[in-house]
Image (cartoon, grey):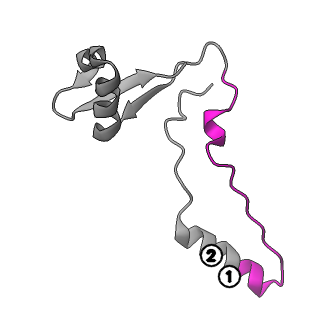
Amino acid sequence: MYADKISFPTVATSSVFTVAIIAAGECKEVATIDIPGAHLHADMPSDCVVHVRLNKYLSNLMMQLDYDYANYVIDDEETVIVRLD
């Protein structure tokens, strides 16, 4: 069900401006809303497995908290892949 959902990109600025220009040309109103971190609080099916690659900074921070995470570092990238719970 979610196998093809591998990223949640931010909308392109040019797309936002394009919609705004079209709406203005048609005398329509436009509203936007952003709920910070909403995807972090979303319900996920129990059979759904999601992995996240942490960047170098976060990977190093995790190792400072618990050096056992060093076992999971991808050597050439210095990142860690974790499974969301």
Q: Relative to residue 38, is residue 29 drawn left or right?
A: right
Q: Residues within 10 Å of mark 1 (few under 14, many from 20)?
A: few
Quick one: quadrant of the C terminus?
A: top right
Can you say whether 34 is above or below 28 in the image? above
Q: Looking at this view, is 40 or 16 the one in front?
A: 40
The residue under the point 53% across, 18% down is 49
Task: Tell me if residue 44 comes above or below residue 55 in the rendering.
Answer: above
Image-based side of 79 in relation to 54, left or right: left
Segment tinted magenta in the rendering: 22-44
Residue 5's image quarter?
Answer: top right
Residue located farthest toward the front when viewing the structure as drawn: 65
Q: Residue at x 76, y 78 (%)?
A: 23
Helix, strand or loop at label 1? It is helix
- Residue at image mark 1: 21
Residue drawn at (81%, 83%) of the image: 26
Are the two marked residues, 1 and 2, in contact with CB atoms closer than 8 angstroms?
yes
Please identify the dominant SS of the magenta region: loop
Tell which residue pokes out farthest to the right in this image: 28
Number of marks in the image?
A: 2
Amino acid bearing label 1: Ile
The disc at residue 75 is: none
The secondary element bearing badge 2 is classed as helix
Q: Magenta span has 35?
A: yes
Q: Nearer the viewer, residue 58 or 82?
A: 58
Report the amino acid beneath label 2.
Answer: Thr
Q: Position of residue 81 (x, y in %)?
A: 36, 25
In which image quadrant can residue 27 be found?
bottom right
Q: Is residue 9 above or below residue 24?
A: above
60 displayed left or right of 50:
left
Q: Which residue is mark 2?
A: 18
Q: Which residue is depicted at the point 83% across and 76% down?
A: 29
**C-alpha separation, residue under disc 1 versus residue under disc 2:** 5 Å
